[in-house]
Image: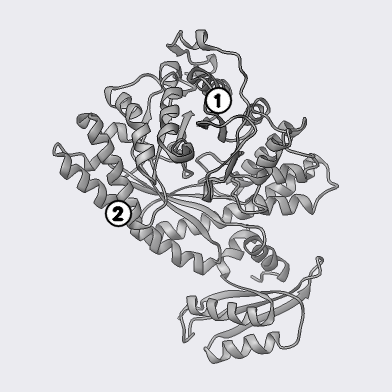
Amino acid sequence: MTISVEEVYETASMTLYQNLDIRTTTLGINLKDCIDSDFKTFKKKVYDKVFTHAVKLVEKARTLEMKYGIPIANKRISITPVSLIMETHCTKNKFIEMAKTLDQAAADAGIDFVGGFGAMVQKGLTKSDRMLIDVLPDVLSQTDRVCSFLNVGSNVAGLNLDAVNLLGGMLKQTAGKSKNAIGCAKFVVFVNAPEDNPFMAGAFHGVGEGDITLNVGISGPGVVKAVVAQNRECDLTQLSEVIKRTVFKITRAGELVGRELAAALNIPFGIVDISLASTTAAGDSVANVIEAFGIEKIGAHGSTLAVALLMDAVKKGGAMASGNVGGLSGTFIPVSEDEGMIDAVQKGALGLDKLEALTAVCSVGLDMFAIPGDVPEETINAIIADELAIGIINNKTTAVRVIPVPGKKAGSLVKFGGLLGTAPVMAVNPFSAKDFLKRGGRMPAPVTSMRN
Amino acid sequence: MEKALLFITVIGEDKKGIVAKISSFLYKKEINIEDINQRIMGDGYFVMTMLVDIKNATIPMEKITRELEKIGKSLELKVQLQHENIFKMMHRV
């Protein structure tokens, strides 16, 4: 079998010029077997299990980067939702100590994030779930690498509004306790959270998973943008076709690296999550892909159709390429991590309302956006509840990662630095839904859940 | 022993000595060239690909990559080394 010069050039260009990378290799680790009535022993078992696996992951990933010439941008760990393993150690101090143990294990092993300091609360809150939410402001501000999630609803459970109503206050406290409110960037609230998502901050190792599994997240907005730019004149069907073909190729690369890495670690291979995910690097922007479609700025009318087309083509290309497509698989549209999104907000093309509309057709939700610090907590809860309702009614995952920045007004700019980028503070509707949200309770599961 | 096949991709502006420099480096390190192709692409880039077998190489892959990068730098070209499996996976169903 010969590979043509054109094919070799296409692949080499993807990594050399178009920022193709394996965005994350995330090792999911079950921590239920670490539970011990003696808390000191429990912590030691957690540290040892996380550290041992994480070190191997970093080492083996480096070898494969070299072999295939594709950078593996992040090596990460996801764990069993922490509220579950802390049920019998339900005190504030122990939760914080557990978070610091995880933070230390990740730091010592050279892992940038460990995800799963969270809980599944779609139907209700246990004592441990409630304690976890209460300690989050301390955990998110006192640790660097620990990421947290909550799943507060699902197609079959409906939406737990009582849980949502705790979040605005929690996020404002977290913002107040951490520099530039950065702690909030490590917390995601979901509905229909996938248990094998490799992307942070929302990764966790679901209870339906095995002891250890390797999940891979592959990205490549730069690659898709390049192919869209080469096809300026084609109609939507053809446009979808060229995107599908490109995504097929990059998913296959992810599958190859994922399978080899899992084999090298002697653990089962989980899923490939093919998600176009922006980074702060120039040209690595989903907004730029949409703009290459022929839209002046993302957020303009027409953007929802464009994101829908992109998202669908990405999924189809991925599904054809791998029998193990999972996680979120689609397109992320975080604001602060995408230079095109930042520019669109600053130029007035994109506001919170249109962003919400785009999330109805993208794969995740309202991601990495900043709002003024004086937005009332009930309004933050309402922003979250609206976004999550979209997910529940449309049988999809939606999520919110919102950063209320103390002392900042709409229009100002907050620099987080590194992977998290720069967020323009977005204006929020000043009218209130306080009395509606105060009702609490649970939005019943939609009629589409009654399939049995 | 089974072959260990990798592609070397050289991208940039065509100039004298590219093949000479790279192949003499490969010869010294006992790396066998199985196939070699070059073309000017539609976007104007000069592209050369070499399929090489490194099973008898006297230095590890990491070092080959670094040395090739050095040669690339001296010629103002991009040089990339990648295992052939990646191309098979991406371009063949």
Going 59% across and 29% down the picture, which residue do you hit?
Answer: A409
Q: Residues within 10 Å of mark 1 (few under 14, many from 20)?
A: many
Going 29% across and 32% down the picture, which residue do you hit?
Answer: A84
Residue A234, how many percent across, how many down?
83, 46
Q: Quadrant of residue A432?
A: top right
Q: Which residue is mark 2?
A: A51
Assign the N terminus of chain A to one quadrant of the image: bottom right
Q: Residue furthest right?
A: A233
Residue A367, how many percent across, how many down?
56, 35
Q: Identify the element where label 2 is drawn.
A: helix
On the picture, is A122 further left or further right than A226?
A: left
Going 65% across and 66% down the picture, which residue do you hit?
Answer: A12
Mark 1 and mark 2: Cα distance apart in space:
35 Å
Q: Chain of mark 1?
A: A
Q: Is residue A222 placed above or below A441 in the rendered structure? A: below
Q: Residues within 10 Å of mark 2 (few under 14, many from 20)?
A: many
Q: Which residue is mark 1?
A: A391
Q: Identify the element where label 1 is drawn.
A: helix
Which label sits in the foreground, 1 or 2? 2
On the picture, is A421 further left or further right than A286?
A: left
Residue placed most toward the observer, A81 or B49: A81
Q: Chain of mark 2?
A: A
Residue placed most toward the observer, A345 or A254: A345
Q: Amino acid at mark 1?
A: Gly
In contact (CB < 8 Å): disc 1 and disc 2:
no
Residue A408, how many percent across, how many down?
56, 32
- Is residue A386 in view? yes
Q: Amino acid at mark 2?
A: Phe
Residue placed most toward the observer, A89 or A347: A347
Residue A227, how many percent across, how many down?
74, 53
